[in-house]
Amino acid sequence: MNTHIFIMAGGVGSRFWPKSRNSYPKQFIDILGIGKSLLQLTYERFLKLTSANQIYIVTNTQYKSLVGQQLPDIPEANILCEPSRNNTAPCIAYATFKLAAKDPHACMVIAPSDHFILYEDVFLDKVQRGLEVAAKNPYLITLGISPTRPDTGYGYIKYDNAQVDGVHKVDKFTEKPKLEKAKEFLASGQYVWNGGIFIWSVQTALAAFKEHTPDIFTLFSKGHNYYNTANEQEFIDREYPASPNISIDYAIMEKANNVYTIPANFGWSDLGTWASLYEVAEKKPGNNVHASSNLHLQDTNNSIIHLSQGKLGVIKGLNDYIIVDDEDVLLIYPKSDEQEIKHVTEILKSNNQEHFL
């Protein structure tokens, strides 16, 4: 079985502002304070499954040099550069058509670059199981995560209890439900989250794009003579911005009737927010999370603190707060209101203060 891994690393991570900036987003940051970025951790995880030559990074053109710096073993040809941010469906279509031109019988794994996975052996075992099934069956497979809260930011998967080879047919796929519906899903015990980690064969993916998103299929089909040549980037720069801005979940997963899931529990977090980072990070005295030796805390508890290197922090009387000092921005915000942070970045943008983003 010929396995190729595509790691999506083109996002901005605006909910992690001000640590995550347009010029240096969160996938490139050592957000866990362990000396490696989230992208590097994801890459090393997949090296246990296949070789560097068969791992690709799909990113925005502006981050190509960053990818090269952080992953020097990745061949330059394996860094796929998107000229515009059009969400995950065009991103995955580009990956699929490029691989189809190189190895039409391959299987592929698509994964985000910025997720936290605690139990890597369990994760890789589930991915391997998915690849074995996808090689033999025309299935669109997604790893299903046991939900821990009624989160409205994820897709929810209701699946058939019956399973074959460890995979379950998906009965219903609901992308980002309203809160009341999410509460129903959680209470029923019959749903898992879509973790955004997909496994399928090239031919199954091509068929899905052709059936459910013919406009995307037609656009990327035009590159047949360009993929894996010196003219590939020119074609992508010219045609890619015209692709619709749509996620793979809305474009295909909600529509297809050959979607399957592998329920799994491998200590997953999408690290989408400061609070989600707080949940998985090591706790210091006072139940605080930080990686600084220059902190003097008094009556400060349950908070996450990120300071610029070498900066001294003296903090008193804060509970359940996000405190981030990064270059020209200081953020002090209640953890319970962290969903507003993305709105703050939108206000800055509308006020022509994009240099802070």
Image: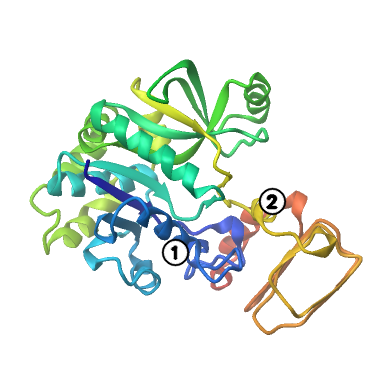
Q: Is residue 308 above or below residue 340?
A: below
- Where is residue 237? Give x, y as percent: 23, 59
Residue 311 appears left or right of 237 = right
Q: Is residue 5 above or below residue 30?
A: above
| Residue occupying the far left of the picture | 225
Specify the amino acid type for callout 2. Glu
Mark 2 or mark 1: name the one nearer the start of the chain. Answer: 1
Instruction: Identify the image quadrant of residue 60.
Output: bottom left
Residue 285 appears left or right of 22 = right
Query: Quick one: SS at disc 2?
Result: helix
The count of marks equals: 2
Judge by depth and name the residue closer to the eye, 129 or 249.
129
Specify few, some or many for label 2: CA neighbours under 10 Å numbering under 14, 14-19, or 20 or more: few
Residue 328 appears left or right of 138 = right
- Where is residue 254? Give x, y as percent: 42, 27
**Could you tell me if residue 304 is visible in this image?**
yes
Specify the amino acid type for callout 1. Gln
User: Residue at image x 63%, y 24%?
Assistant: 181
> Disc number at residue 333?
none
**Could you tell me if residue 255 is visible in this image?**
no
User: Residue at image x 60%, y 65%?
Assistant: 351
Instruction: Identify the image quadrant of residue 202.
Output: top left
Query: Quick one: SS at disc 1?
Result: helix
Distance from disc 2 to disc 1, alpha carbons, whole Å, reads 21 Å
Look at mark 1 in the image and give the residue it sits on. Answer: 40
Specify few, some or many for label 1: CA neighbours under 10 Å numbering under 14, 14-19, or 20 or more: some
Look at mark 2 in the image and give the residue it sits on. Answer: 279
- Where is residue 134? Give x, y as percent: 29, 32
Judge by depth and name the residue closer to the eye, 301 or 223.
301
